[in-house]
Image (cartoon, rainbow, N blue to C red):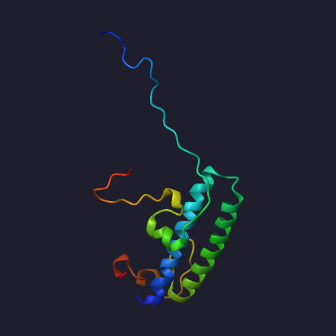
Amino acid sequence: MDRERYRRLEEIQAIGFVLIELNLYLDTHPDDERALREFNTYGQQLRRLVTQYEAQYGPLLSSGYSPSQFPWKWVNEPWPWDMQ
Amino acid sequence: MGRKPYTSLELAQAYIPYQYYTDSYTPKEALRKGTLFPELYRPYLPGKGRR
């Protein structure tokens, strides 16, 4: 996996993690407007990053989120042990 | 003896201080540290008890 692809994947994972953290925080602090704003902003950012990534490299999730081109793409994506 | 122990003491009470969101790590740093919030960062240092 080339360096640029790995960097973008890592970015997606990092933003996804931040969203989980803000999600948990908001569960106990539903009135925190700043946290909510950040949650929404990061959410948009994640969707944008995922769309860009998938357009260039292929699907990140197999069912329900990413339509596949022909031939079936999913099985040819890098497996976890292909990451360096 | 026969006296019940600890009658003057209260049973254990769990409490969780309320978290106030002030600072946050960058996404990359948060992923590496396992939390977005500096106040929740608990690095594990082998052989070193905390405080």
Q: Is residue A5 visible?
A: yes
**Which part of the image, by quadrant, shows the N terminus of chain A?**
bottom left
Q: Residue at x 54, y 72 (%)?
A: B27
Q: Is residue A48 left or right of residue B29?
A: right
Q: Is residue A59 above or below residue A39?
A: below
Q: Residue at x 48, y 89 (%)?
A: A4
Q: Residue at x 44, y 70 (%)?
A: B32
Q: How many marks?
A: 0
Place residue A25 in its image quadrant: bottom right
Q: Is residue A60 left or right of residue B23?
A: left
Return the x and y of residue B6 as percentages of the image width and height.
39, 20
| Residue furthest to the top | B2
Q: Is residue A44 above or below residue A33?
A: below
Q: Is residue A79 left or right of residue A57?
A: left
**Which part of the image, by quadrant, shows the C terminus of chain A?**
bottom left
**Nearer to us in this view, B49 or A52:** B49
| Residue furthest to the front | B51
Q: Is residue A63 visible?
A: no
Place residue A66 in its image quadrant: bottom right
**Nearer to us in this view, A42 or A55:** A42
Q: Is residue A75 above or below residue B14?
A: below
Q: Residue at x 61, y 50 (%)?
A: A28
Q: Is residue A71 left or right of residue B5?
A: right
**Nearer to us in this view, A31 or A49:** A31
Return the x and y of residue B48 as percentages of the image width and height.
31, 55
